[in-house]
Every structure is written in structure tokens, then in C-alpha cells.
Image (cartoon, helix red, strand yellow):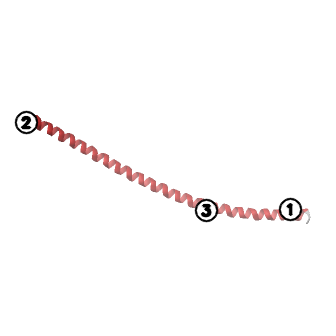
């Protein structure tokens, strides 16, 4: 085998290796796309859950505020009734 034949054999091997690497790169890109899509769905679900909890928390704070106002009014009425008894 002369030098040209050796070089051609090496080039063929390199070309085969490059084709394999390109196929591997396509596989990696496909897997990465799947991971990105799944990750995006997970983030969207987390964001939706956060929004739901925030709204529930806001409603609870509003209800507690209303109860505090009612309690203060009731305490004022009780105080006025007790003061009138004296």
C-alpha cells in the first residue's frame, strides 16, 4: 500500500466517522428539543400553580380583613351596650 492509498483510507475512515458524528449530533438535537419542550411545560404548570395560590391567598387576606372590620364593629357595639348599662 503506497502513501496515497494510506491517505485515501484514512480520509474514508474520517468521512465515516464524521457521518456518525453528524447522526449523533442530530440525535442530541432531537433529545434536547424534547427536553426543552418538557421543561417549558413544567414551567408553565408551575407558573399556573403559583398564580392560583396567589389568587387564593389574596381572597383569604380580603376575607380576613372583612372579618377584622366586622369584629371591630361588634366590639364597638358591645362596648356601647356595656357603657349604656352603667
In this view, 54 is above or below 25: above
Q: Which residue is mark 2?
A: 85
Mark 2 and mark 1: span between their CA atoms? 114 Å
Q: Quadrant of residue 26?
A: bottom right
Q: Select label 3 or label 2 by which is in front.
A: 2
What residue is shown with label 1?
Answer: 7
Q: Earlier in the sequence, mark 3 or mark 1?
A: 1
Residue at 34% over, 47% down: 58
Q: Nearer the viewer, residue 31 or 79?
A: 79
Of the image marks 2 and 1, the number of the one nearer the N terminus: 1
Label 2: which secondary element:
helix
Q: CA distance from mark 3 to mark 1?
A: 34 Å
Q: Residue furthest left?
A: 85
**Mark 3: few, some, or many residues within 10 Å (few <14, many ≥20)?**
few
Q: Which mark is residue 30?
A: 3
Q: Is residue 65 above or below residue 83?
A: below
Amino acid at each position: 500500500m503506497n502513501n496515497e492509498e494510506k491517505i485515501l483510507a484514512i480520509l474514508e475512515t474520517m468521512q465515516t466517522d464524521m457521518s456518525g458524528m453528524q447522526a449523533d449530533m442530530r440525535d442530541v438535537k432531537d433529545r434536547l428539543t424534547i427536553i426543552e419542550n418538557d421543561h417549558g411545560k413544567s414551567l408553565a404548570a408551575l407558573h399556573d400553580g403559583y398564580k392560583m395560590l396567589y389568587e387564593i391567598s389574596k381572597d383569604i387576606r380580603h376575607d380576613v380583613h372583612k372579618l377584622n372590620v366586622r369584629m371591630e364593629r361588634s366590639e364597638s357595639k358591645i362596648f356601647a351596650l356595656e357603657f349604656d348599662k352603667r
